[in-house]
Image (tube, rainbow, N blue to C red):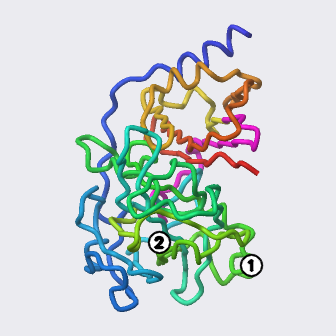
């Protein structure tokens, strides 16, 4: 490996304790626009205001009701910035000795700029066509484009609720909606998202974007803890860093990290990574990747040995520049 490139990778793999930026109250949902629980179908905790404010990682949640929905409003519009733009926190938890699996009740995520037209994030289900059972678990990575599979970490001391690794929950990138007909027609403006609609997935009946039936554990509905904005109007810098992750069907990871001001502007102490929602030492993760490109802006790393074809997982990486501007992304490993 080129010595200069090795130094770049080594510098960014050196983890240090960093003080997270204090989140402002405006980054969380501030109003309940509407709620439909289908007559409190499935039982649970029906208190829409529980979904406002910061994620707590507890039972202080709102149950959507089987097939129900909840619309939350933001006082400062969410915008499409570099990487993920919002995090949806449900309350999944780990029941078994398998650290990569959770009890998950999942939900669709939709966004709107006018409160009338809502664009739904594209979704995919990678699990078997069977009900996991009332107390079953699924591997984190079974769902793409759905919320409810990754446990919340934002309630832990010092955690940054806007960091896709430290906060836990399921992160969404508005750029994934660029091809949506409502976005292309201008009816949904990805630079002015004011409302987020959360819709319960009815196990075995709801389908993903490809028409495949979605199955999740439990006999009730998804429970909403909070929605957190990462990028909002007035907070996105044109010179902020960018994290891009690709995971191929063959299980190969490609990671691109760059900064418009050059890679030297990246803050190595802010580098975070997680596998299936479990934070890991970023140095170990990067050690399993090979650098294939480096330039003045950043570098690209790839995995040369594919992972087992049956392995489902998610990969999250986050990073800030020296001015505190952030980028982070979570990707699910495609299997077809």
Side of 180 where 220 appears, left or right = left
Q: Determine the residue located farthest toward the top in the rendered image.
A: 3
Residue at position x 54%, y 51% from top? 237
- Residue 279 vs 44, above or below: the answer is above
> Which residue is denoted by mark 2 in the rendering?
77
Determine which of the numbered discs, if any, sits on residue 255 in the image. Answer: none
- Is residue 245 a member of the stretch shown in magenta? yes
- Residue occupying image coordinates x 49% and y 77%: 199
- Local packing at callout 1 (Cα closer than 10 Å; few below 14, some 14-19, many 20+) is few
Q: Are marks 2 and 1 in contact (CB under 8 Å)?
A: no
Q: Quadrant of residue 35?
A: bottom left
Q: Nearer the viewer, residue 121 or 216?
A: 216
Give the Cα separation between the discs numbered 2 and 1.
21 Å
Crowd rating for badge 2 (residues with CA inside 10 Å; few <14, some 14–19, many 20+)? many
**In this view, 306 is above or below 184:** above
**Residue 68 appears at what percent x and percent y?**
44, 83
> What secondary structure is found at the residue carrying circle 2?
strand
Q: Which mark is first along the chain, 1 or 2?
A: 2
Span colored in magenta: 230-255
Residue 177 highlighted magenta (yes or no): no
| Quadrant (top left, top right, bottom left, bottom right) of the N terminus | top right
Which of the 4 quarters of the picture holds residue 10? top right
What SS does tag 1 mark? helix
Q: With 34 as the anchor, is 203 left or right in this view?
A: right
The residue pinned by badge 1 equals 181
Find residue 290 and report its horizontal and vertical position in percent: 70, 21
């Amino acid at each position: 490996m080129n010595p200069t490139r090795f130094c770049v990778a080594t510098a960014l793999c050196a983890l240090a304790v960093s003080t997270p930026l204090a989140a402002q109250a405006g980054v969380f949902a501030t109003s309940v626009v509407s709620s439909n629980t289908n007559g409190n179908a499935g039982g649970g905790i029906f208190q829409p205001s529980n979904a406002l404010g910061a994620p707590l990682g507890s039972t202080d949640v709102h149950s959507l009701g089987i097939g129900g929905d909840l619309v939350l409003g933001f006082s400062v519009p969410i915008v499409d910035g570099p990487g993920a733009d919002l995090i949806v926190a449900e309350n999944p938890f780990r029941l078994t000795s398998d650290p990569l699996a959770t009890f998950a009740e999942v939900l669709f995520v939709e966004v709107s700029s006018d409160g009338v037209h809502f664009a739904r994030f594209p979704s995919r289900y990678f699990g078997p066509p069977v009900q996991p059972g009332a107390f079953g678990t699924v591997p984190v990575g079974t769902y793409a484009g759905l919320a409810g599979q990754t446990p919340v970490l934002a309630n832990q001391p010092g955690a940054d609720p806007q960091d896709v690794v430290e906060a836990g929950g399921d992160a969404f990138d508005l750029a994934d909606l660029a091809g949506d007909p409502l976005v292309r027609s201008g009816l949904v403006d990805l630079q002015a998202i004011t409302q987020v609609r959360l819709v319960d997935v009815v196990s075995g009946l709801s389908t993903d974007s490809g028409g495949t039936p979605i199955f999740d554990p439990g006999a009730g509905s998804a429970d909403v803890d909070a929605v957190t904005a990462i990028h909002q109007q007035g907070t996105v810098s044109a010179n902020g860093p960018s994290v891009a992750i690709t995971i191929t069907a063959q299980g190969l990871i490609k990671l691109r990290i760059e900064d418009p001001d050059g890679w030297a502007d990246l803050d190595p102490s802010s580098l975070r990574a997680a596998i299936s929602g479990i934070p890991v030492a970023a140095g170990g993760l990067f050690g399993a990747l090979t650098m294939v490109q480096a330039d003045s802006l950043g570098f690209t790393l790839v995995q040369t040995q594919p992972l087992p074809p049956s392995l489902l997982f998610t990969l999250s990486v986050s990073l800030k520049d020296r001015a505190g501007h952030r980028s982070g992304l979570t990707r699910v490993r495609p299997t077809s």
